[in-house]
Image (cartoon, helix red, strand yellow):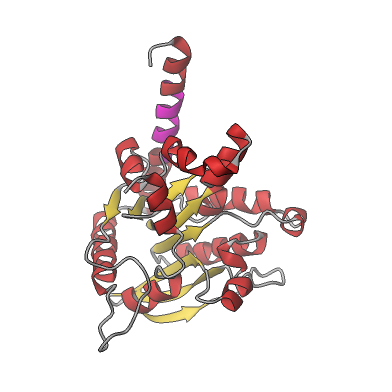
């Protein structure tokens, strides 16, 4: 598949949602709500669960399975209250030594006037800073769309993985085409230029691995004779999380925070180096 094919797969309304991953990868989930300032943003879903008997905090963007649910969850586009809720849950996880697992699937943070009035940019910035210093393991999995700061607001992690047909980018192909060429219809071309597929990002060192979707089906999670066609996918995600957590066992909180900080710092240094070479005509 080319890039736009994967974009469309990532947006497939019938792909598993955060509730599917929680129900099939974790047990004993207890949902936590609210940002402690007066509102619960339903587009961020999270709480405490057990992963093979180990307490963890699970957080993810939430989209619905119907038009009504999508509207209720604002189509997976959080406002500042959602990011404040996510950071609250992460700080609680740090206090009690629980690893944090996040599932990313959003077209971006909500760009509405109300969100801007109530501190959207500040809320995301505080999440980036707060996650950088967390002294517990953080594992992020991009399961569908991972667009803009809306995605990064819960994805500053020690390990970042992507599903095979997920995308991860600074904005949507339509937005990119509109800005660069003033023509959103050139989204197919934009998708190729943006290098937003899991395969591209693994090559660039932005992510740490790709979780295969092969043999799992690519659309709705259907129950047929009590067999869930996505069971293979849930099993692969389970194994990936287990392997990552094992890797961090024995590391101190300071070491975990430093490892995460250095991971993202290296990306910045590589970008600056390549940008300088382009300007000098070496690339």
Q: Quick one: quadrant of the C terminus?
A: top left
Q: Nearer the viewer, residue 102 or 166?
A: 166
- Residue at left 28%, top 50%? 209
Q: Position of residue 182 (x, y in %)?
A: 63, 36
Would residue 171 be seen by someone viewing this image from the given angle? Answer: no
**In the rendered image of this protein, does residue 177 appear above or below residue 256?**
above
Q: Nearer the viewer, residue 2 or 273?
A: 2
Q: Position of residue 241 (x, y in %)?
A: 29, 62
- Residue at left 52%, top 68%? 62
Q: Position of residue 27 (x, y in %)?
A: 35, 80
Q: How many marks?
A: 0
1 relative position to 133: left or right: left
Q: What is the magenta range?
A: 264-273
240 relative position to 191: left or right: left
Q: Position of residue 282 (x, y in %)?
A: 38, 12
- Residue at left 59%, top 33%? 181
Give the image quarter of residue 58. Answer: bottom left
**In the rendered image of this protein, does residue 201 appear above or below residue 248?**
above
Q: Is residue 266 magenta?
A: yes
Would residue 279 be seen by someone viewing this image from the given angle? Answer: yes
The outermost residue toward the front is: 185
Q: Nearer the viewer, residue 281 or 51?
A: 281
279 relative position to 162: left or right: right
- Residue at left 41%, top 34%? 267
Q: Is residue 269 magenta?
A: yes
Look at the magenta stretch and give its main secondary structure: helix
The outermost residue toward the bottom is: 225
């Amino acid at each position: 598949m080319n890039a736009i094919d994967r974009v469309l797969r990532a947006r497939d309304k019938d792909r598993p949602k955060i509730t599917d991953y929680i129900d099939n990868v974790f047990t004993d989930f207890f949902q936590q709500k609210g940002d402690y300032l007066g509102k619960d943003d339903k587009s961020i879903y999270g709480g405490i669960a057990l992963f093979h008997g180990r307490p963890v905090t699970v957080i993810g963007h939430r989209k619905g399975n119907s038009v009504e649910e999508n509207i209720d969850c604002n189509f997976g586009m959080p406002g500042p209250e959602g990011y404040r809720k996510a950071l609250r849950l992460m700080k609680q996880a740090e206090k009690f030594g629980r690893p944090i697992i996040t599932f990313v699937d959003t077209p971006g943070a909500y760009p509405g006037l109300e969100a801007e009035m109530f501190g959207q940019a500040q809320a995301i910035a505080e999440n980036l800073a707060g996650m950088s210093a967390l002294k517990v393991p953080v594992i992020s999995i991009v399961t569908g769309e991972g667009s803009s700061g809306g995605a990064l607001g819960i994805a500053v992690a020690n390990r970042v993985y992507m599903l095979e047909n997920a995308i991860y980018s600074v904005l949507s192909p339509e937005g990119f085409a509109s800005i660069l060429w003033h023509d959103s219809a050139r989204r197919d071309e934009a998708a190729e230029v943006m290098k937003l597929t899991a395969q591209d990002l693994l090559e660039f060192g932005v992510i740490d691995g790709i979780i295969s979707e092969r043999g799992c089906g690519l659309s709705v999670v259907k129950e047929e004779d009590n067999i869930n066609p996505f069971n293979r996918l849930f099993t692969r995600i389970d194994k990936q999380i287990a392997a990552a957590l094992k890797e961090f066992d024995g590391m101190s909180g300071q070491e975990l925070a430093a490892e995460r900080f250095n991971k993202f710092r290296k990306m910045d240094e590589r970008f600056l180096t390549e940008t300088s070479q382009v300007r000098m005509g070496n690339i």
